[in-house]
Amino acid sequence: MSVLLDGFLVRATLAALGVALAAAPLGCFVVWRRMAYFGDAIAHAAILGIALSLALSLPVFPAVLAAALLMSVAVSLLSGRTMAEDTALGVLAHGALAVGLVAVSLVPGVRVDLTAYLLGDILSVGRSDLLIIWGGAILVVALMTWQWSALLTATLDADLAQAAGIDARRSQLILTVGLAITVAVAIKIVGVLLVAALLVVPPAAARPFARTPEAMAVLAAGIGALSAVSGVAISWQLDTPTGPSIVSAAAFIFAVSQIASRRLDSR
Amino acid sequence: MPLFTIRNLSVAYGGKTVLSHVDMDVSKGEIVTIVGPNGSGKSTLLRAIVGSVIPATGSVSKPTGMTIGYVPQTLSLHPGLPLTVRRFLSLPIPVSDDAAAKALELTGADNLGAAAMSSLSGGQFQRVLLARAVLGSPDLLLLDEPTQGLDQPGSAAFYRLIDTLRHEIGCAVVMVSHELHVVMSASDRVICLNGHICCEGTPEVVSNAPEYRALFGTLTGGALALYRHEHDHDHAGAHTHDHAHDPSHGPGRDA
């Protein structure tokens, strides 16, 4: 019995760690490029992907990935002359969430536990899930590492990047794909509602203690990992939903980081 | 032989033509200044040279391997992005500490390497942007209103610095400016732009051209008057002397 318990707790912890590691470097760019709402919209679109996978009996991962990519296309098509981007994102994010929830409940023959998708169901992570999560996480971290300098330059200024031979539009595409992959692997861990928090909170907590972009990303990964491990532990001890527990732990670390940095400043 | 050529370049944003039928040659080591009222397409022209905008007609022909050092109008740093000057200089191509220190020295931003970008004054910030642009000795230096936020002595010093750099690196310089009076004296050639090229030539020729006067004579009467004023001084020889040798206005002194 205890071996079995160890098994799923270990899997849960490993899964949460994988997602936290992928989310950290990507989350830094989400912060620096003011893409928090964009991340939210992509995450909310994931519920549409889940409806799609239930209706067509597809695996969840590719369906969510497709929905997330479609959402990013919709955002870029809709924002423009007559609509500010945050309005477009607001309409699309909440629209996708609502339509997704309706669609999931309409899928015939399945009684779905919606909270598992909204808040994550980390304790049901199986071996194959773990493989997908870590595969996706490694892919995202590799993509970020490979493109780091180019992405950073494009984030500072599009023309500055272009003058150095970097295509700023390509950078945006890389970040969008990275976001879609991260959201797709994170759904099972933190759920649709809180994916964006995992992207934004650890980098925000890391910021006061970093002097370079790289230090911020590494520190954010550490904070994300700490949140993941303590979130799973809290969830196990107190029988609380795991996704919200992880994000609560991250928010707590953020609060401590803010207080600590003010103290340091005032000294 | 020109460094690069622009032929029949037109650019449109959403159906509205911003630049039409621009022809332009820039030679090696030349300083070309683009002047023009707001919305005249100055920044668009620079962005077309960089390759950020797709022309509606015509083309910018740059030799393959031509390197560009670009100084943007502003760099809006996100407060959430920690960035030291040293790290900024290595974006996107890593440079050695020696090269970084030399570039900072060249632009009068000595010893700023460890400083956070967000802690710099306006003058220091522009010098650091310039330091990054001259790293790797580019063939062309592109500056989009590089002295925004600098006071008059500050911008005069900045333009003298650009002239010095042009000789040090041997690069061509294309810049956009609003400060007609200062820029005119610092340029080999001035292009007056208003959606199309109104007139071009040496600063003396352009400032006397009827097209230029039609655009700026009423719009920026003050600046033109100031230019004339300095022009008079140039003839007397006193003004240039004063500026060139006054160490308190030298590069690196404003902070």
Image (cartoon, coloured by chain):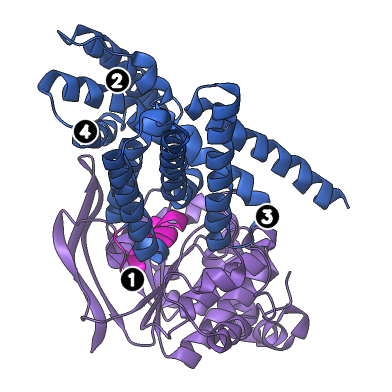
Q: Is residue B76 left or right of residue B23?
A: right
Q: Splitting the image into 4 quarters, where does residue A121 fall? A: top left
Q: Earlier in the sequence, mark 4 or mark 3?
A: 4
Read off the magenta span. A151-167
Which kind of residue does numbered mark 1 sit on? Answer: Glu
Q: Colour of chain A?
A: blue
* Residue A35: % across, % down: 43, 39
- Co-location on one chain, circles 4 and 1: no
| Residue shown at the point (27%, 55%) measured from the top left | A170
- Co-location on one chain, circles 3 and 1: no
* Residue A51: % across, % down: 21, 19
Q: Which residue is mark 1?
A: B200
Q: Chain of mark 3?
A: A
Which kind of residue does numbered mark 3 sit on? Answer: Phe
Rate crowding at label 4 as few (under 14), some (14 to 19) or many (20 or more) other CA atoms within 10 Å: some
Q: Chain of mark 4?
A: A
Q: Which residue is mark 2?
A: A96
Q: Nearer the viewer, mark 4 or mark 3?
A: 3
Q: Is residue A131 visible?
A: yes
Q: Colour of chain B?
A: purple
Q: Is residue A82 left or right of residue B169?
A: left
Give the secondary structure at mark 1.
Answer: strand
| Residue shown at the point (22%, 76%) measured from the top left | B62
Give the secondary structure at mark 3.
Answer: helix
| Residue shown at the point (59%, 30%) measured from the top left | A234
Task: Give the number of the disc on residue A70.
Answer: 4
Give the secondary structure at mark 2.
Answer: helix
Residue at the far left: name it: A56
Q: Splitting the image into 4 quarters, where does residue B200 fall? A: bottom left
